Image (cartoon, coloured by chain):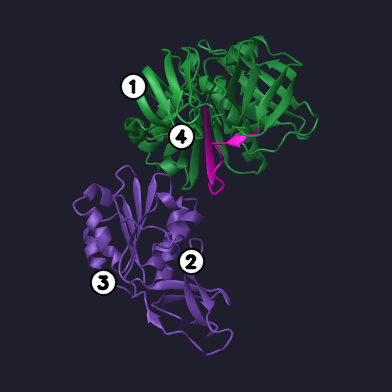
Chain colours: A purple, B green
């Protein structure tokens, strides 16, 4: 059953009407970016790409992205630094700029949240989910974020509680919700399931 | 009843704003304060003409700070089917009318970082309210207001007095046109555009927005269609078991109401979607005039908006 609160990622599509393209890619998301700009030299010339090889990539796609000859390519060492760079670019962007996000779900979510911060409607952001199905989860108790969660229950990387991953996505936080699973009898856990590889 | 709660009101003031525009102040007959509303809202005014009830949507210009009055602006249209003519000829201080609760189909987007308001002619009424709200909240905006000539700018002086250089005026008779491409070229990300005015102007401004690379989510418009008169036809309401005639000067919705059936409606201008009705059979061609259904839905022949659309043919059977 689809998760009602989870956004739908229909896939990247080049918006020919846009005057500028601001593209954020993580890991395998680079392949989706390469696909839409393939043979579209004019569009690539008005594109700014922020790329981080990220955890989900088997290889680094920076060189292939540079071959597209975008207006600018920023290769960043992590998701966090990529988002910082993206925020700087969004702050100076004008209307007519379209935002694109490709990569793991947590990264797409962070790009959408940055867009919202800058007044961009989430429906006008093009998204494509690539790579792992790992979830970014917020512990509802200590509010700490744990990245790349592939199983439920799991241990909160901040407070150490055993958390059950709920199918409840927050667009604002770009994260699923993790709730303590063993509060009656600490240590008594349901079987761990690897659901989000 | 359909259309929601009605508020009986009395006209407390009539201003002749221009040769063709009058502004009416309405106060609740009960003496109670009128409800608060958000900028961009409209009410449907019911006028008791001698032969029938006329119901037209009008945008709210403002509400007195103490809630004692609403103001609406009415343009006397040349091809009026009675509504604007009635307001101009028959309504004076003391006249009693009835209004619906305010409904907003044209709201300011709260997540926007800047707002461009564009008005043409009488389309300025919701824009006036929006500018006031943006000013109160100290949010950045620009207002572009096009009018036929200086004498027909029903709100020009007040807008300039309230908002100063945020307002740009354009006069058709001086060949001044709104240069959409220049206005929209260098706006910061997160800017929203709102346009209200004549059909052709709305289309041109929205096309200009798309041309400048703006996504549809940031382009907003409101247009209330007058119902278009046409040939008479017959309508059968399957559930009610009623058959009635729709006269040339009457809308489908008005004929249904005259036959004593309480059909759904809200804006009566083809914008809100409330009166969407399933078509069971149509012996003839559906003449769609609304802005709510998609082109595919129009083509499917399965739905009709009773407030503005009609049949060109013999008989229409509706699921009512």
List the residue tagged with mark 1. B285
Which residues fall within the magenta stretch? B101-119
Foreground residue among B118 and A11: A11
Residue B48 image offset from top left, x and y in percent: 66, 16
What subunit carries mark 4? B
* Distance CA(mark 2)–CA(mark 1): 48 Å
Q: Please tell me which residue is depicted at 38% across the width and 66% down the height of the picture.
A: A105
The residue under label 2 is: A168
Q: Secondary structure at mark 4?
A: helix
Q: Is residue B118 magenta?
A: yes
Residue B299: quarter of image: top left
Which numbered marker is on residue B183? 4
Is residue A85 at least partly visible in the picture? no
Residue to which mark 3 is pinned:
A60
Chain at tag 2: A
Q: CA distance from mark 2 to mark 3?
A: 32 Å
Q: How much space separates mark 4 and mark 1, taking CA atoms?
A: 42 Å
Q: Residue at x 27, y 59 (%)?
A: A33
**Disc 3: CA contacts within 10 A as few (<14), some (14-19) or many (>=20):** some
Neighbourhood count class around disc 2 (C-alpha, 10 Å): few under 14, some 14–19, many 20 upward: some
Q: Are marks 2 and 1 in contact (CB under 8 Å)?
A: no
In the image, taking residue B227 as reference, residue B47 lies left or right, namely: right
Are both tags, 2 and 1, on one chain?
no
Front position among marks 4 and 1: 1
């Amino acid at each position: 059953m689809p998760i009602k609160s989870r956004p739908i990622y229909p896939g990247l599509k080049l918006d020919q009407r846009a005057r500028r393209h601001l593209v954020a890619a993580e890991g395998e998301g680079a392949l989706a970016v390469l696909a839409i700009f393939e043979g579209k030299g004019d569009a690539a010339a008005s594109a700014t790409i922020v790329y981080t090889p990220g955890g989900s990539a088997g290889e680094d796609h920076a060189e292939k992205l540079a071959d597209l000859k975008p207006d600018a390519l920023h290769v960043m060492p992590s998701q966090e630094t990529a988002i910082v760079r993206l925020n700087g670019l969004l702050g100076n962007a004008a209307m007519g700029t379209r935002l694109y996000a490709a990569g793991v779900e947590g990264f797409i979510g962070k790009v959408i949240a940055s867009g919202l911060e800058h007044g961009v409607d989430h429906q006008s952001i093009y998204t494509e989910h690539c790579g792992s199905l790992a979830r970014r989860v917020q512990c509802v108790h200590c509010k700490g974020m744990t990245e790349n969660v592939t199983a439920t229950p799991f241990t909160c990387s901040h407070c150490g509680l055993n958390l059950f991953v709920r199918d409840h996505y927050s667009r604002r936080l770009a994260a699923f919700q993790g709730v303590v699973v063993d509060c009656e009898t600490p240590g008594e856990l349901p079987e761990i399931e690897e659901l989000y590889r | 009843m359909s259309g929601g709660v009605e508020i009986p009101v009395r006209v407390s003031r009539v201003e002749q704003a221009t040769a063709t525009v009058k502004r009416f102040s309405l106060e609740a007959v009960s003496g109670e304060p009128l409800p608060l509303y958000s900028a961009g809202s409209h009410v449907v005014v019911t006028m008791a003409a001698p032969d029938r009830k006329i119901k037209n949507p009008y945008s709210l210009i403002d509400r007195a700070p103490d809630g004692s009055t609403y103001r609406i602006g009415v343009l006397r249209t040349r091809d009026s089917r009675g509504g604007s003519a009635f307001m101009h000829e028959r309504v004076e201080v003391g006249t009693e009318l009835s209004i619906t609760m305010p409904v907003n189909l044209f709201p300011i987007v709260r997540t926007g970082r800047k707002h461009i308001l564009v008005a043409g002619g009488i389309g300025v009424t919701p824009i006036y309210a929006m500018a006031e709200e943006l000013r109160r909240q100290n949010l950045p905006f620009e207002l572009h207001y096009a009018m036929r000539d200086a004498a027909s700018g029903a709100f020009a002086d007040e807008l300039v007095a309230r908002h100063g250089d945020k307002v740009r005026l354009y006069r058709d008779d001086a060949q001044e046109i709104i240069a959409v491409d220049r206005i929209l070229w260098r706006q910061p990300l997160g800017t929203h555009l709102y346009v209200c005015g004549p059909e052709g102007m709305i289309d041109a401004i929205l096309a200009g927005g798309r041309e400048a690379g703006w996504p549809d989510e940031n382009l907003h418009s409101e247009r209330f269609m007058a119902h278009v008169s046409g040939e008479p036809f017959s309508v059968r309401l399957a559930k009610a078991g009623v058959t009635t005639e729709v006269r040339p000067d009457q809308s489908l919705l008005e004929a249904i109401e005259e036959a004593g059936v309480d059909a759904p409606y809200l804006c009566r201008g083809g914008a809100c979607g409330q009166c969407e009705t399933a078509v069971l059979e149509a012996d003839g061609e559906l003449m769609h005039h609304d802005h709510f259904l998609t082109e595919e839905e129009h083509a499917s022949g399965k739905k009709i908006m009773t407030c503005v659309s009609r049949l060109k043919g013999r008989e229409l059977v509706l699921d009512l």
